Image (cartoon, rainbow, N blue to C red):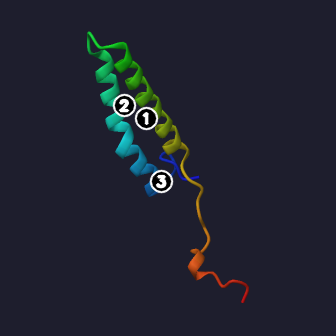
Amino acid sequence: MNGIFSASPGTGPIRLLVGTHGLMISQSMLALMAPDVAVSFRLMVLLTLALALGGLGAAMIGLPAEDHEPYWRRRHGR
């Protein structure tokens, strides 16, 4: 696994982290702190916050490291 806390994080988890979490978490927290906000809007913001935190968890775990050749370079039993 090469998540964001590994020695050499992959580009996928880093892009996932930067693209979603910084913006979604901060915007969700700002929207929840606003006074006089409708309940339906608060529920939508909480759903967005849950998605952002789930993405943060996925970025922390990372993707499995691939140490084999691409499929188009394999020898196919020769």
Indicate the quadrant where residue 43 lies.
top left
Question: What's the residue type where badge 1 is placed?
Answer: Ala
Task: Provide the secondary structure element on which disc 2 rests.
Answer: helix
Question: What's the residue type where badge 2 is placed?
Answer: Ile
Location of mark 1 (residue): 52
With respect to residue 61, does 1 lie above or below?
Answer: below
Do residues under tags 1 and 3 come within 8 Å of each other at their CB atoms? no
Rate crowding at label 3 as few (under 14), some (14 to 19) or many (20 or more) other CA atoms within 10 Å.
some
Do residues under tags 3 and 2 come within 8 Å of each other at their CB atoms? no
Mark 3 or 2, nearer chain start: 3
Residue shown at 32%/13% (left/top)? 38
Q: Is 70 placed left or right of 12 in the picture?
A: right
Do residues under tags 2 and 1 come within 8 Å of each other at their CB atoms? yes
**Mark 1 or 3, closer to the camera:** 1
x, y (%) of residue 2?
Answer: 54, 53
x, y (%) of residue 4?
Answer: 47, 47
Location of mark 2 (residue): 25
Q: CA distance from mark 1 to mark 3?
A: 19 Å
Camera-nearest residue between 72 and 38: 38
Residue shown at 59%/64% (left/top)? 66
